[in-house]
Image: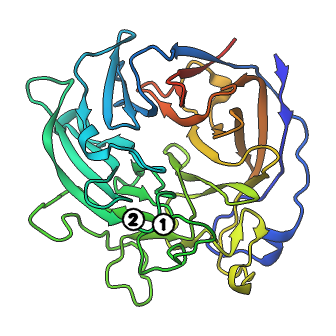
Amino acid sequence: MRLWQALSVGVALLSAAACSKSDYMSNPAPAPVVPSFDYRLQSIFAGASGLESPVDLQAPPGDSRLFIAELTGRIQIVEGGVVRTTPFLNLRSRVLPLAGESGLLSFTFDPGYSTNGFVYVHFIERNLNVNGDIVVERYQVSSTDPNVLQTPGTEVIRIPHHDAQNHYGGRVMFGPDGKLYLSTGDGGGGNNQFGHAQDAMSLLGKMLRIDVSALDPNQVPPYAIPPDNPMWPTVGRNEIWAIGLRNPFRPAFDMPAGRLYIADVGQGAREEVDVVDASLPGLNYGWSIMEGFMCLGIGGNCGTAGLTAPVYDYDHTQGNAIIGGFVYRGTAIPELQGTYLFSDLHSGFLRGLTLQNGVATVVQAPMASAGTDVTLSFGQDGMGEVYILTAANRVLKIVKP
């Protein structure tokens, strides 16, 4: 057993949309060093494995296969330690050539996948505009081959993102309520220069929530908007679940606890983790009024009334682009149950955040690091085990030593 080095603060978990100025501006008290276990990163695939820029790893519950999305547009299947010859899906012609932060970003299996075979795929399509559109499409598994998706898919949502080549977000995922969620970046550039994050008329810089249970491609939009979505002033349609996000590259639900975790990439100073009750609508996460706990004050505005503060942030001496992971719910490492795992694009550390009595404690495993690789993303298999994916085409599994 090893002591992890405690790295951060005890911060009260917010359970409502509003917070006071002191919630943001005070210096939280350090958490004590927490005894825990040691764990390592085990290489599952190396650079010559046949994968190209792996960016997402998922699987239906209980499925032993690994479904791995590549930034360059394919979803590959790994079965028995071998990448299958035929991809699950190939969208390379629609996402290449890559520019900025574009590509195939994420995918998710429908909660009813075992019976309906639906998979939702989230990518940046560049054949319409040099900076691309954010697109989510639904595909269905072949009736004759469970390792192939039928094409073409059905478009679910398309969001123009034409101002810049960065800050697309995001992740597509299902929540505990069975609705489909999509996180989007603020449109790119710097300092929220296009004004999307705090504009409820824009679908950028948001968390969206839609109902795809009766998707109808002959309607506009083809999805339904849940009647319990928040109502935003002057907005005719209400896909928006929350606002005030910069580049929420990897949010995740923790289904057993009913919480939503959002790792929102900061700008010049702070990286943040937001944790809220998954059922709370209408939250404003503060960008670009705030960056983490720090007042950014764009336009001279530092008022925090009505904003939801993060539970944790860190400065750029420790890293400069947070990569959100998952709350561990596997069985191989019982000591890790309930711990939210995350990393940083440039530092490659592996940190864990736990919440107890509303207080967040963040610790780091000294022997677990993605090294000098640029960390792209996390993945979670059908048994709940967690992986790190890197730009050097490595897939690393979090294991006990």
Whether the residues at callouts 2 and 1 have beta carbons within 8 Å, the answer is yes
Quarter-wise, where is residue 300 in the image? Answer: bottom right
Identify the residue shown where x is 69% and y is 79%. 298
Secondary structure beneath disc 1?
A: loop
| Residue, disc 1 | 187
Q: Residue 211: tell me if it is visible.
A: no
Compared across the picture, whether 14 is left or right of 221 comes to right
Q: Position of residue 276 (x, y in %)?
A: 60, 59
> Residue 219 occupies which quadrant of the picture?
bottom left
Q: Position of residue 371 (x, y in %)?
A: 69, 25
Given residues 239 and 368, the one toward you in this image is 368
Q: Residue at x 18, y 36 (%)?
A: 115
Mark 1 neighbour class, 10 Å CA radius: few under 14, some 14 to 19, many 20 or more? many
Label 2's element? Answer: loop
Q: Is residue 142 left or right of residue 311?
A: left
Comes first in the chain, label 2 or label 1: 2
- Work out whether residue 253 can be spotted: yes
> Residue 239's spot in the image, x, y percent?
36, 70
Q: Disc 2 marks which residue? A: 161
Alpha carbon separation for disc pair 2 and 1: 6 Å
What amino acid is found at the position of numbered circle 2 in the picture?
His
Which quadrant: the N terminus?
top right
Above-or-below relation of 272 to 109: below
What residue is rendered at 38% in x and 63% in y?
209
Question: For the C terminus, which image quadrant?
Answer: top right
Residue 159 vertical position relative to residue 65 in the rendered view, above or below? below
Q: Amino acid at mark 1?
A: Gly
